[in-house]
Image (cartoon, rainbow, N blue to C red):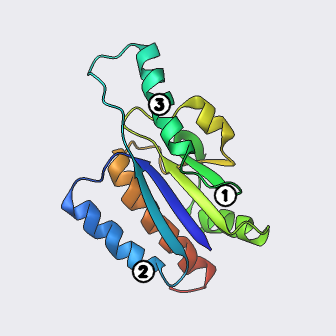
Amino acid sequence: MKITIVAVGKLKGKYLKEGISEYSKRLSRFCELQIIEVEDEQAPENLSVSQEEQVKRREAERIIKRVKEGSVLIVLDLKGKKLSSEEFSDKLNSFFISGKSHITFVIGGSLGLDEELVRKADFSLSLSDMTFPHQLARLILVEQIFRAFKILNNEP
């Protein structure tokens, strides 16, 4: 099984890097994990709606280039479905059972994701009703993927 996370922007913060590194090590016994960072689009503070859409579209173009053909595409989106850890584990398992061995998660930049990219996704996931910085969302996602595999393997 292979899990790819495509995320907009470079990970900053030492604590985030250390946390993701720790969960990546833990995940290595369950799956192959790859994290791909795509460049974020530089944008001034006060963007018009059309400028925001352009930024998200350019970021989406970079993301799509990194998504492998045949991979299940799951986007993190505020309007996505909220799942418990157990439900998330079941969701991943349903893809694996159906013969899909590669899942790609996408985390957008600070402005979110392009709507066309969200529509192309096989599943849209919301981590919470709360808003998290997109870099922290990366750490939360890796931890939840690890937890999902633990649940699938009936481990405490």
Which dot, 1 or 2, sits closer to the camera?
1
Number of the label disc, if any, that sits on residue 26: 2
Q: Answer few, some or many: residues within 10 Å of disc 2's Cα (few below 14, many 20 plus, some between 14 and 19).
A: few
Which dot, 2 or 3, sits closer to the camera?
3
**Reading the chain from its start, which is encountered first: label 1 or label 2?**
2
**The disc labelled 3 sits on which kind of residue?**
Arg
**Reading the chain from its start, which is encountered first: label 3 or label 1?**
3
Location of residue 15 with respect to 58 vertically, above or below: below
Q: Residue drawn 71% across and 57% down?
A: 70
**In terms of depth relative to the viewer, which is nearer, 110 or 7?**
7
The Cα atoms of the two marked residues, 2 and 3, are separated by 34 Å
Q: Is residue 3 left or right of residue 18?
A: right
Q: How many marks?
A: 3
The residue labelled by disc 1 is 71
Question: Whole-percent x and y of residue 123?
Answer: 66, 49
As drawn, the residue found furthest toward the right would be: 98
The residue labelled by disc 3 is 58
The Cα atoms of the two marked residues, 1 and 2, are separated by 23 Å
**Reading the chain from its start, which is encountered first: label 2 or label 3?**
2
Q: Secondary structure at mark 2?
A: helix
Location of residue 115 with respect to 32 vertically, above or below: above
